[in-house]
Image (spheres, rainbow, N blue to C red):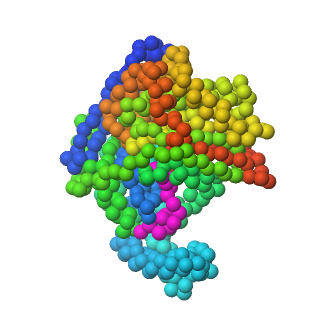
Amino acid sequence: MILHRGHALAVLALLAAAPVAAQDVPVVERTLSNGMRLVMVERHEEPTIAFGWLARAGSANERPGTTGMAHLFEHMMFKGTKTLGTSDARRDAELNARQDAVQARIREEMSILREKQRRGEIADMSDPAVRTPRLQEALDEFARLVKEQRALIVKDEMDRIYTQAGATGINASTSEDRTFYIVSLPSNKLELWFWIESDRLANPVFREFYSERDVILEERRQTLESRPGGTVDEAYNAMTWMASPYHWEVIGWPSDISQVTREQANEFFETYYAPNNLTAILVGDFDPDAAFALAEKYLGRIPANPEGVPEVITLEPKQPAEQRMVAEVETLPSFEVAFKTVAAVHKDSPALYALAGILGGTPMFMSRPGGPGGMRPPSGRLYKSLVLDQKVATRATAYSRGMKMGGVFSLRATPVPGKSPAELEAPLLAEIDRVVKEGVTDEELERFKKATLVGFYGRLETNTGIRETLSQFLTVGTVQDFQDVLARVQTVTREDVQRVARQYLVKDGRNVLLVSRKEGGKPPEGMRGMPRPRAALEGEVER
């Protein structure tokens, strides 16, 4: 059964029928001859289709020196193909080759400057004042080549074709474990989608590659470095994850972004954007057999990568001791503690989500704002204890987030005026101890389970909601994980919740962040300084 808008009574009726499975969603899974998977949900309520395809290529598939590559590709895949995005494909290719040659000279000069900085002969290799004449000459030549190429570019041609065909929601996003490309189209544009997407996978042209690095550096400055507490959050994440590639932010380190080469990008594309590492998702008004035939015709022509994708083998070791970070920032003061947990498909994951729901009132699934499973008023033990009863905090939350190779359980609180972040530590940790010693109530667990059902079914109201939910499960697991999730949640017991609290929320596993307002700093304006929104199954950088 797939719910539609206005079916609140149907949702409530479903709550009495636990456990409920997602097996009612008519998912059809097929595999093309080249190994690409096609996951389809036929749904004729409206004449549209929500399309998407995901590459299992996120920041965790990068390595030091190439961090930010997955997110860079999110940008590059909109630059066009041999037939889209340029008025002169031959000259365009020549200019790309000449830019590569000039960039090689630039890298040689930057290497010299890097060594001078290492020896203390210069303070900052990026300072224009320390450029050598050879470097400046190469930079000037590169600028001329970029200007000539931009005169040939047909800007946003792919987006324009989609928009003229009635498309909405053209976008992409990158997370630690995947990159996802989406669009919604009228159902009579099914073949158009297969043609465009197969063209940009079979014949991509990474135009403006080097100048796009500067675009991403500016994006990093605006979304991370200029955000109050942004670099502190980045450092805190790097402290929390010691060995795992979750150690760096999805957007990457600036020194890597500024130096990545097109040759490295080509290698990344050939490895991770091969069809046997891709999954297409279609939800809406179409016939699965007809869609599969078109998929084979267009996407099936792309050769597979016979070597497959390298497995991420670095596992996070057990944390030997508590870690602490103390920061002063022009932002709202806060106290946060994070514990590393388990992957999204781990058997303990549902119990950890339940623990987060009971402590922080955090729904496992969020759907459209204001609808079933959407944002709720503050609730949970932390809010009741720290905000309402003790009146030491203005907000207090908890969330659990499972990823492909690990997870994190985090609790965060903002002190009331006159209280320091350190004064929140004891009452917040006391709530953890209370669960460890006393467990949770039947009523609390049942409330979480009902909220999960409402949120999940709220997502199934729309084509895009189904597409997004499927994509999250396919990133970390399989269609079966999607179909089993509600049943797994319904089987969680009070003993399970108490056990995971005792097992994972331990003293040696704590990663503590104390943020105080910098002395003389201005109070945050409006939403400025608010913590980043975090949800149980989400955490992405969008195009």
Magenta segment, which residues? 246-261
Image position of 379 (left or right of 356): right
Residue beneath the point at 25% across and 38% down: 30
Magenta stretch encompasses residue 406: no
Above or below, 27 against 254 in this view is above
Between 111 and 82, the one lying in front of the other is: 111
Image position of 444 (left or right of 19): right
Between 519 and 105, the one lying in front of the other is: 519
Above or below, 12 against 455 in this view is above
What's the magenta bit mostly, secondary-structure-wise? loop
Q: Position of residue 514 (x, y in %)?
A: 65, 45
Between 145 and 443, the one lying in front of the other is: 443
Q: Position of residue 388 (x, y in %)?
A: 71, 25
Q: Position of residue 469 (x, y in %)?
A: 42, 35
Residue beneath the point at 39% across and 42% down: 404
Residue beneath the point at 52% across and 45% down: 321
Quarter holding the N terminus?
top left
| Displayed quadrant of residue 412 | top right
Decide if residue 371 is in sight here.
no
Image position of 242 (left or right of 533): left
Magenta stretch encompasses residue 253: yes
Q: Position of residue 436 (x, y in %)?
A: 53, 26
Residue beneath the point at 37% across and 51% down: 314
| Displayed quadrant of residue 510 | top right
Decide if residue 511 is in sight here.
yes
User: Which residue, as the protein is rendered here, is positioned at the far bottom?
Assistant: 133
